Image (cartoon, grey):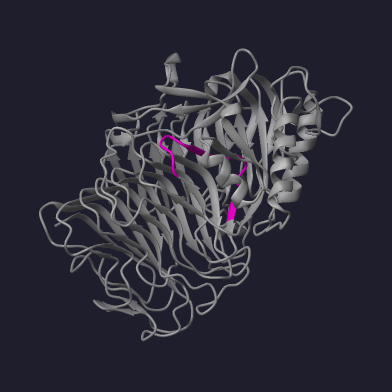
Amino acid sequence: MRTTPVRGARTRAALRRLLACSLVTVGVAGLVPGTAVAATRPGAPDLGPNVFVYDPTTPTAQIQAKLDELFARQEDNEMGTDRYAVLFKPGRYDVDARLGYYTTVAGLGRSPEDVDIHGAVRVVGQPDPNSPAGISALTNFWRSVENLSVTPTDWSNQWAVSQASPMRRVHIRGTLWLEPGNGGYSSGGFIADSKVDGVTINGSQQQWLTRDSELGDAWTNGVWNQVFSGVLGAPEQGFPNPPYTTLPTSPVTREKPYLYVDDSGDYRVFVPGLRHDTAGTTWADGRRQPGYSLPLRDFFVARPGDSAREINHALARGRHLLLTPGVYHLDRALRVTRPDTVVLGLGMPSLAPDTGDAALRVDDVDGVRVAGLLVDAGPRRSDVLVEVGGRHSHRDHARNPISLQDVFFRIGGPWLGRATTSLVVNSDDTLIDNIWAWRGDHGNGIGWTSNTADTGVVVNGDDVTAYGLFVEHYQRYQTIWTGERGRTVFYQSELPYDPPSQAAWTSPTGNGWASYRVAPGVRAHEAWGLGVYSYFNQGVDIRAARAIEAPRSPRVRFHDMVTVFLNGSGGIERTINEAGVPVVGSYGTSNVVSYP
């Protein structure tokens, strides 16, 4: 953390806010694309050196050169610290945007139809000698596309991704291709509030969640766990063959906030409203999305050099928070104490607690939105990385819940990290929408006694709804649910690869630790589309007695579960409690359609 005195930090912040009235990040002929230049109108914000804003007057060659430069820089930068956002004002652009790590491409229109990319916004496979045809998407993480339309000029728009690579508010005017090609492995993925006019080629994707979207043509194939919630044109329920879990509506949703430019050229953030029993997009056919708009002047626009104290001072005074791309090293937790605060990341920013504190704590108040962040544990162990509400919180937030969207946790990978629990949700009615909590299996600081972490997600609040829980490689339970009437739509989890012995990985209820645990006292819970996989790679016969552990009760219900032996040794004995068959010693799957 920077140790400049507070007075200096505040002076710099005040100067930056003054300059924000006269600077904009744009592509301009004759300058390096994206360089901050004098604005053509007052009120254009300074979003920092790693945000590139373009309008239709910018030469196409200039935009393409910047996109190619960023891809070359980020294609293999999996554990790097660079972060970027490329933003397009309303209009048409003839470009081919290939996305590497930590890159966001987004439109600045009020509707996805306002920005039309003729060409592609795509993610391609990477060389992988262990995958068919020598290519895979198994490590295509941490990138996103939002709020635009794509008219493919090739036969499709390829989006070959795995976890933490969301597609939101996107209109694909043609075919969407989700695999790397030729059967190469892939482990995605998440789409929400989007529309695909043509065929969606799922191909080799092991699992996928599509929520509140519209499919104009077929969804092809499926490996283990494909879930559709509130999707018009979704394939019919078929689990396990084909492996489709289809919910006609989503019970309660709220879409992610997004940055846009209004008709006057002012930057604003739209904050979508709460909806119930939804299907399809919020924007198709010209419909106006429920919600409200905030001027960017109501936000503290943070830069990576800002201290936690400075950011907390702004939050305490009632400012919302826009985190521009970069890594934010924190000596204390960021604190959200006011209702309806928006915390929005731009270009995959990382919060990195350095002192053993949390990265973010949200009080038990109405309507807080947290979206678009990475959270990287530090070398000093944190008890928790993000905490929502206090331990004994039980206020009713049903009309205006807290929401967490596209929040991604890492224990190890970029550097050594340690944290007991990544996410704790205490507040009732919280909405969780696309979370990947990952104890690293590769990268820096990796090892059973190095990047230590017990549990990914703990839900203590009542009436919490989760769409897209990806929780992997933690050393005890991956997910613990103690709150009443919880709902999970789609769950994906790999057990830890690296237990050194069975003795080192044994829970109070038997061999290993279940991935998804509903506490014994819970009376009501429901979950759809759960996949738990094993790959114990230490050459030791490691067993998990069960993948899912839950009370046997008529109101604790599970639908469409699968366990898979991927590789390695050992395996999983049962899918849920006593149900399912062993998947041990060699490739195999165990499907359970309903429980109890």
Residue at the image position 36 percent from the left and 37 percent from the top: 366
Taking 298 as reference, is 456 left or right?
A: left
Give the vertical position of 392 relative to 230 (above or below): below
Which image quadrant for residue 91? top right
Whether residue 341 appears in magenta in the rendering, the answer is yes
Taking 78 as reference, is 110 left or right?
A: left
Q: Nearer the viewer, residue 474 or 419?
A: 419
Magenta stretch prevailing secondary structure: loop
Residue 264 placement (x, y as % from top left): 63, 13
Residue 274 placement (x, y as % from top left): 34, 30
Q: Nearer the viewer, residue 512 or 445?
A: 445
Q: Can the viewer see residue 335?
A: yes
Residue 94 placement (x, y as % from top left): 70, 25
Give the vertical position of 23 relative to 349 (above or below): above
Whether residue 346 appears in magenta in the rendering, the answer is yes
Residue at the image position 63 percent from the left and 36 percent from the top: 105
Start-end of magenta stretch: 337-351
Q: Nearer the viewer, residue 62 or 533?
A: 62
